[in-house]
Amino acid sequence: MPTKTDFNDRMLSLGLARVSEAAAIASAGLIGRGDEKAADQAAVNAMRDQLNKLDIAGVVVIGEGERDEAPMLYIGEEVGSGNGPGVDIALDPLEGTTLTAKDMPNALTVIAMGPRGSMLHAPDVYMEKLAIGPGYPEGIVSLDMPPATRVSALASAKGCLPKDITVCILERPRHQELIAEIRSTGAAIRLITDGDVAGVMHCAEAEATGIDMYMGEGGAPEGVLAAAALKCMGGQMYGRLVFRNDDERGRAGKAGITDLDKIYGRDEMVTEDVIFSATGVTNGSILSGIKREVGWVTTETLLMRSKTGSVRRMTYRTPVAQIGRAHV
């Protein structure tokens, strides 16, 4: 039986919360201002600064893009002080840049950390995703099933009718047939414009969010982040990479992926215990957004460890005068 790598996750978890908090606070002044790039850059800068204060030898495996595409937090970038455990880092400094720019719900800052080699190095391509929350038999739904069958299977396991199931789907033209098939079962669909990491996380708290299942194609890197979240929260997730051309197949080859049709389970995307932190930027179903008052800013963060199953909800309130100084 393989030994589990201890990367001091208990001590690092609060440091990771500071990282997602800093990114959220940095983007606060750009909520509703219509500038996606400025909001994203502010979050990237703050997240990188905070990561470099942690005593880790970190490598970004899911980041802002390839080295030639992203000046900071690119795939392969080394972060941290260099003193401490070797860790893989998956991050999205602002999950929902458009949501932030338009002040729409469910924008988050997201980061996950695990031992070196614990996360799938997903290329920047699409991934077909399927996720459900905890409490169901393993394999009750699969990507090999037609979408309508997945709805029926989940309804049967839940002890309800298909019309009582709600599926979350990213609103894109490529999903028209998927949406039509699911609606033919009588199930409800909640369409989201952006933010499919949050969409998957909603399945894990179905009673609070009203979402039973997530389906559809979205970014593969975000799929790994979502798998890290579900590894902590509980639930099942499956992903299959989708390639539109030879260039995208080449990206998979560079990432060391040879089986292009493989269906990855949650624990194949994230193979060891991880810690995960998400901070709300705009109000959402899982986290409250940043609250700004005269002289103060308040955030809510979800901090989770898969090893123990612990989930912390933390409120952080700081004077505006402290922002831009050392984040404490």
Image (tube, grey):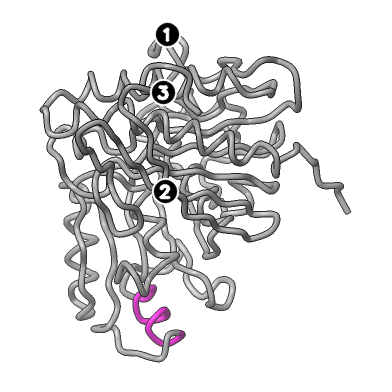
Q: Are marks 1 and 3 in contact (CB under 8 Å)?
A: no
Looking at the image, residue 115 lies above or below residue 169: above
The first of marks 2 and 1 along the sequence is 1
Q: Secondary structure at mark 3?
A: loop
Measured as percent of width and height from the top left, residue 235 is found at 52, 65
Q: Which residue is mark 3?
A: 64
- Residue with the mark numbered 2: 315
Magenta residues (range): 149-157
Q: Nearer the viewer, mark 3 or mark 2?
A: 2
Residue 244's tag is: none
Label 2: state its secondary structure.
strand
Callout 3 environment at 10 Å: few (<14), some (14 to 19), or many (20+)? Answer: many
**Magenta-drawn stretch, dominant element (helix, strand or loop):** helix
The mark found on residue 68 in the picture is: 1
Q: Position of residue 183 (x, y in %)?
A: 18, 72
User: Is 226 inside the magenta-drawn segment?
Assistant: no
Nearer to me, 274 or 124? 274
Question: What's the residue type where badge 1 is placed?
Answer: Asp
Where residue 248 appears, x then y in whole percent? Answer: 41, 27
Marks 2,1: beta carbons within 8 A: no
Distance of label 1 from label 3 (alpha carbons): 11 Å
203 w.r.t. 318: above or below: below
Q: Residue at x 70, y 47 (%)?
A: 272
Which residue is depicted at the point 37% across and 61% down? 202
- Looking at the rendered structure, the number of numbered marks drawn on it comes to 3
- Identify which amino acid the numbered label 3 is placed on: Glu
